[in-house]
Amino acid sequence: MNYLVEVKNLKKNYSSKEAVKGISFNIKENEILGLLGPNGCGKTTTIGMLLGLLKPSAGVIKIDNMDFEKNRIEILSKINFISPYIELPKKLTVKQNLIVYGKLYNIKNLQQQIQYLTEKLRLEELLNRITGELSSGQKNRASLAKALINKPKVLFLDEPTASLDPEVGDFIRSFLETYKEENKISILLASHNMNEVNRLCKSVLMMKNGQIIDEGSPKSLINKHGHKNLEEVFLKLSRSENEFN
Amino acid sequence: MNLIRIYGLFLRHFYLITRSFPRILDLIYWPTIQITLWGFISNFFATYSTYYNNAVGIILTCAILYDFLFRTSIGFNMLFLEEIWSRNFTNLFISPMKISEIITSLIITALIRALIGLIPAILLTSPLFGISILNLGISLFFLFLSLYVFGITLGILVSAGLLRFGPSFENIAWSTMFLIAPFGCIYYPIDILPDIFQKIAYAMPLVYVFEEARSILIYQTVNVENIYYAFILNMIYLGIAISLFYYSFNQARKKGTLINIGE
């Protein structure tokens, strides 16, 4: 099996607190894996370690068959990230931001790549506008263009459609589905939008208290727990007191 | 090191500065005000003080040199803080930039920022006060170089603190220069300081730079030893600062500060 992301027994401790308690999972090529769990369950910490912002206390992360800690810079050139909680420099135009990040990722044929993303993400009218003056949906598309500027093999998405109106949210989801198919990339999607997860992800990890408490396809999880939809499964697992501690 | 990535980060700040007239004005405004003020003070002392009697412009020259140090150091910190304020920190640290590339890019950008502010102010000194900093001759280059290296050393040290402790370290960023100034002997000779302070002052490159400036302007004597000591001390402090920056980055990755700063 060709895994682009391999995580084995990953742990993160902050002094006395164990934020992530030895989780293991893989993401295949051309797969979107959902990462679900209540606030404070360790999702952000896990993504932080996968992005190299956090050093794991134990365990191994391999991306594209390379150990992250030993090949941090090379791996960072092959991955990217989007989250509504981080922003592109507000005072620069969208085009300037894409140029800057294109340079930071040392992209060859940068103009072509910007042109490609501009067309795909409908950025034509936004390119010369100041990023800080865009609406949430427009900023989101600009951030997505930045996240794809380096043609990443692995994309990490943290609530990519949070606070977007349904039309823009649907556009982003459709775009991600198509882009993944065309480019055979792997995506890790952390989201609280269960419909989004249901639509995009073939498999899902449920996290709680720093552990993976269940995993499987959305359909198999719904059947296993005897609920009508993924949201009910999420609520059941989130509310189960210490069941998995 | 990859020059394109270094250029990319430079470009980010270049776009930021050149897009905004108030930012350019802000860069020029303070050095000009500072130097104009010290120009009048310098004229006053040159007229009424025996020490400065035959050396019009010593204070002004030292003010210009100090301002260059101040602008370089603050400039480096500002560039780093800019990433925190704009919530772009995470984007920067998940890009494949090496720490050495980030430091190099900020060092170059800080120099350009300092020069944008200082060159107009220096040009003003000649018609306004009849003083040219070029009177320091070839030594001027070495004095500026020393101050530049020490300025970015302080900038790197403060940025290391920001990395390690997060935005709460921001206030330190603004106060570093004021803490060091009394020991730098910018406007007075080192003999003025009490013995214990003199020992501290001699451990910093600043005192050698400003003693050298006074030596040239008052006695027309170039003391190469001063420049040499300043250079050696600068190299030691720069090495310590860069090592601390790497250490802080690794600690921030362990303690999670990079995530907290970024959001």
Image: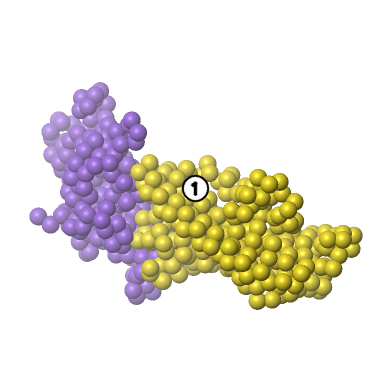
Q: Which chain's residue wears label 1?
A: B
- Residue A13: quadrant of the picture: top left
Residue found 83% across the figure and 63% down from its top:
B52
Q: Dot 1 corresponds to which residue?
A: B162
Taking the spot 68% from the left edge, 62% from the top edge, the residue there is B210
Residue A101 visible in the snapshot: no
Q: Which chain is yellow?
A: B
Q: Secondary structure at mark 1?
A: helix
**Quadrant where the image shows the N terminus of chain A:** bottom left
Q: Is residue A243 left or right of residue B116?
A: left
| Chain A drawing hue | purple
**Is residue A188 shown above or below A120?**
above
Side of A59 relative to A170 (left or right) = left
Task: Tell whether B73 sits left or right of A105.
Answer: right
The kind of residue on which mark 1 rests is: Leu
| Quadrant of the snapshot with the C terminus of chain A | top left
Q: Is residue A13 visible?
A: yes
Q: Position of residue A204 (x, y in %)?
A: 20, 43
Point 51% across, 52% down: residue: B157
Asked if residue A158 lies left or right of residue A93, the reply is left
Which corner quadrant of the image does residue A78 belong to? bottom left
Is B48 located above or below residue B135 in the figure? above
Q: Which image quadrant is residue B119 in? A: bottom right
